[in-house]
Image (cartoon, rainbow, N blue to C red):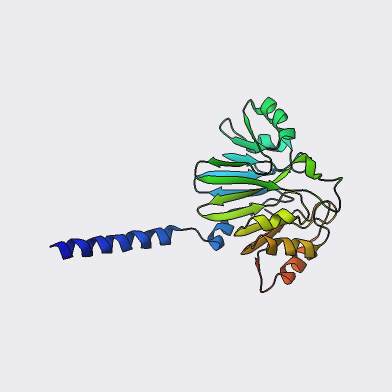
Amino acid sequence: MKKYVVSMMLVLGLLVLSSLAFCATSPEQMVEKIHWLGQATVKIEAGDKVIYLDPFKIEKADKADVILITHSHQDHFSPDDLAKVATEKTVFIAPKDCAAAIEAKFKTKVTIAEPGMNTKVGDIQIEAVPAYNVVKPKFHPKENKWVGYVLTIDGVRIYHAGDTERIPEMKNFTCDIALLPLGQTYTMNNVQEAADAALDVKAKIAIPIHYGLAEGKAEDATEFSKLLQGKVNVLIKTKE
């Protein structure tokens, strides 16, 4: 009888482990839930939650559970576009220089983001990491404490770099999916630098963003893919 009970427990344990493995989300599955809406605007479907990062030039009204802002430049922090996706229940996370405007417009409390911030919304872990320019510091000074974000959703780590050049801090964290800017006027200095950043964060999948509006072009995304061939899987998203 004891052997039977032990055997059944082992079988049940294996079934549970098998079920968990089956339900686990892979980076390849997660990329299907990531939508590039142009510039740095990204929408992520995280189970029953909808996340927006830097909503700008929003064409369709939506309901965001979480909105993350990387910094206060107009193409990343647009109160009019926030209004198209925010509800009375939306959780806002943004740098200090954006918070007062958000709180006044939406009558809500903002979680202040600066490098090193770590918080949780439901099952979603959100970390703020540095984002700044080294060669072109006048555009995104380090002292402004603007950020990128690393989101952990179903065990998959997604890095949205914000507006940044390749910076030393990128070697201090890792991700499964990296969303990296290809604009070379205000962010990376060239496409090679963006490719090197993907390697620094040890991304399994890299998705180029922040190109095609005021800076960067489609050919840069193709070059980005070629530079990472055999090293990182590059997925060039079509703007939605």
Q: Quadrant of residue 71?
A: top right
Res. 135 image quadrant: bottom right
Rendering coords of residue 207 (x, y %): 67, 60
Locate residue 69, reporting x and y percent.
69, 41
In this rendering, position of residue 116 left or right of residue 214: left
Q: Residue farthest to the bottom?
A: 230
Query: How many numbered tags mark residues here?
Result: 0
Q: Nearer the viewer, residue 218 or 154?
A: 154
Drawn side of residue 185 relative to residue 158, left or right: right
Q: In screen coordinates, is 25 left or right of 172?
A: left
Residue sitting at x 40%, y 58%: 20
Is residue 63 in sight in this rendering? no
**For the view shown, which residue lies furthest in the left direction?**
1
Write the residue at 69% across / 62% down.
200
Q: Position of residue 131 (x, y in %)?
A: 74, 48
Q: Give me the residue at 81% from left, 60% from top.
A: 217
Is residue 85 visible in the rendered image? The answer is yes
Residue 70 rendering spot, x and y as whole percentages: 71, 43
In this rendered view, identify the residue nearer to me: 63 or 190.
190
Q: Indicate whether 189 appears above or below 126.
A: below
Quadrant of the rendering where the N terminus is positioned: bottom left
Q: Nearer the viewer, residue 107 or 153?
A: 153
